């Protein structure tokens, strides 16, 4: 079969989303990247660097990431970057023989696996959202978002360690780390078959600039750097990430607000009688049967509001205070 | 074998290059991206867009690329973008069954094929740098830079058409189009199995911002968009590309200078007795035997100058006037 026909059959079509509404569907940060920091990015630019093939990552960004990680067991050869955390996931699917993930999970795992034609295995989480018993080993890469997406719940250390002990490689996707406040990066002291993936898209309001980073053994980072595009993150995007880390207290303040709003919404939703998860991300997750869910989505559509639908329910991104108030009112009315 | 060991055996290591010298080795534009255009990029930014997953490409960039292409047979569904032209090449290697290319050619074809573990076939150009007879067909993608890299010479239309007629898919890499002034994009009126790849890295002094674009049939673009990363080019990089196209006369002026310098160097090198190609890129190519080449490279190293070595000779990027004068002096002394 013609390769283009094969791809059209195998892979999801590329789609863009209309933004002419209250958009709480992609877990974006409600706060814009601060204007004065945009000014600082442009002040710090050396416009003569724009014409060259600029190292990706540059040493300064690696140092700032290392200091942000604040560990005593990592060095510059334990860190690399991606064109968003998405590229790191995408490349890891090319690096290993088979990708394994546990729905409900990050939807791009399936999208990227089908895009690149990677072998993959999906084994649903257990009824109480635990990592299932699964037959994995060397050659497999197991993608585990923690906190999980779309449910936001957190996996216990023992669950992660059970998979690590099988010898399979674990991609621990900590995209929502900042909204949880706890990381399992310390597992790297004990396990070589682990990569921790982080992003500037969520807590640092930089989704449009596509900067993710990965922390792992020197052996993994060397292999990852061989397989990825050599110049994968632009000069200006790296500068945005550096300026963000230099002013992390601004983003920590905002993260505090988002976490408070999340907890406010969780208790309000519980009081209304909704079944929700103990989300630790920048979103809440409401379990809903299909029929009720379709009615809610339709109700929200009439209010020009977009949230994200999953088989098990709906995920609602934490927005600005007034957006969260509006969502609570609508869910009260709907109830 | 452990996938990481397999990659370390199969793929080239990631390397960065020290820039503490006159650097004429990566075909970068000698002119910096204009400061006032950097200001214009920054003025046109909507800082609230930085927090969202920004469409890649956005419609405005596609329209500006279409108007730059200036054809009457292409529409917005015939164009997409890449994280540099490199990502387009990289993704095409994932889309097709086998990659074929004709050394001496763009070194990243081989690097990316080995990085992603793609099947590939290398058939050297003929003695007089023509496309060889080669057995290719559906399922194959044939990468042809035109003007060629590193030799800079141009392939005749008939040579390209011979490959198109086999049914193999042709990736016509026109990264140096602006320095040649002629394109074979019109082949798209006649052939579906063709993609023309362009870049903002060379003529537009934006190598650090990673923006390439591809022009092809709607069917190809649909398949490419399914396989690539959905958010592959950042918001700010797209703005740099838009501002560059809005002020293309500045870059056309610079390209004129670079082409004049190239022709000046070609005649001077011929007069010195060097065997060179009729390069149409932003570089010259000097044929040299191994032993003489090593001596020249050593000589240039003592002068803190970096050029690019190939089996057949050396490629020297056209730099600023004083850099070109210095290179001519050193090649005269060396002769």
Image (cartoon, coloured by chain):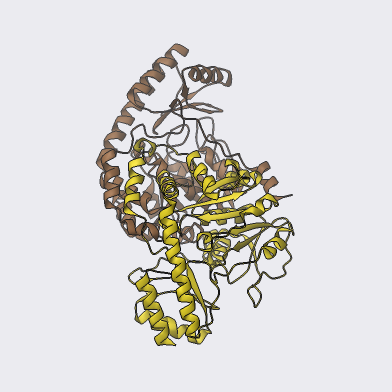
Chain colours: A yellow, B brown
Any part of residue B325 in sight: yes
Q: Position of residue B300 (x, y in %)?
A: 48, 19
* Residue appearing at x 39%, y 37% in the figure: A49
Any part of residue A317 in sight: no
Residue B292 higher or lower than A165, as above or below: above
Residue A130 higher or lower than A161, as above or below: below
Image quadrant in which you'd find residue A78: top right
- Choose between B321 and B289: the one closer to the eye: B321
Q: Position of residue B327 (x, y in %)?
A: 41, 20
Q: Position of residue A72 (x, y in %)?
A: 61, 45
* Residue appearing at x 72%, y 67% in the figure: A134
- Choose between A118 and B284: the one closer to the eye: A118
Residue B304 higher or lower than A137, as above or below: above
How many discs mark residues in the rendered view?
0
Residue A179 higher or lower than B42, as above or below: below
Q: Position of residue A255 (x, y in %)?
A: 45, 61
Q: Is residue B226 left or right of residue B65?
A: right
């Amino acid at each position: 079969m013609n390769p283009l026909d094969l791809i059209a059959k195998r892979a999801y079509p590329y789609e863009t989303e209309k933004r002419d509404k209250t958009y709480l569907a992609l877990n974006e940060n409600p706060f814009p990247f601060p204007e004065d920091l945009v000014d600082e990015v442009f002040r710090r630019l050396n416009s003569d660097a724009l014409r060259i093939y600029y190292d990706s990552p540059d040493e300064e960004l690696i140092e700032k990431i290392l200091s942000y990680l604040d560990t005593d067991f990592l060095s510059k050869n334990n860190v690399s970057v991606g064109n968003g955390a998405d590229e790191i996931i995408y490349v890891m699917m090319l690096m290993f023989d088979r990708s394994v993930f546990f729905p409900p999970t990050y939807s791009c795992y399936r999208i990227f696996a089908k895009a690149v034609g990677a072998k993959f295995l999906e084994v649903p989480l257990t009824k109480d959202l635990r990592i299932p018993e699964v037959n994995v080993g060397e050659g497999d890469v197991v993608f585990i978002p923690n906190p999980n997406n779309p449910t936001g719940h957190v996996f216990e250390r023992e669950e992660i360690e059970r998979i690590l002990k099988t010898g399979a490689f674990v991609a621990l996707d900590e995209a929502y780390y900042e909204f949880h406040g706890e990381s399992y990066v310390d597992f790297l002291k004990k396990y070589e078959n682990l990569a921790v993936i982080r992003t500037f898209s969520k807590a640092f309001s930089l989704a449009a600039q596509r900067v993710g980073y990965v922390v792992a053994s020197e052996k993994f980072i060397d292999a990852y750097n061989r397989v990825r595009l050599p110049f994968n993150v632009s000069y200006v995007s790296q500068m945005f990430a550096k300026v963000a880390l230099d002013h992390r207290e601004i983003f920590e303040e905002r993260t505090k607000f988002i976490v408070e709003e999340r907890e406010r919404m969780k208790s309000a939703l519980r009081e209304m009688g909704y079944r929700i998860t103990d989300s630790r991300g920048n979103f809440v997750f409401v379990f809903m049967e299909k029929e009720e869910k379709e009615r809610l989505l339709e109700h929200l559509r009439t209010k020009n509001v977009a949230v994200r639908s999953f088989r098990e329910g709906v995920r609602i991104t934490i927005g600005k205070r007034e957006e969260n108030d509006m969502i609570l009112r609508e869910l009260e009315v709907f109830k």
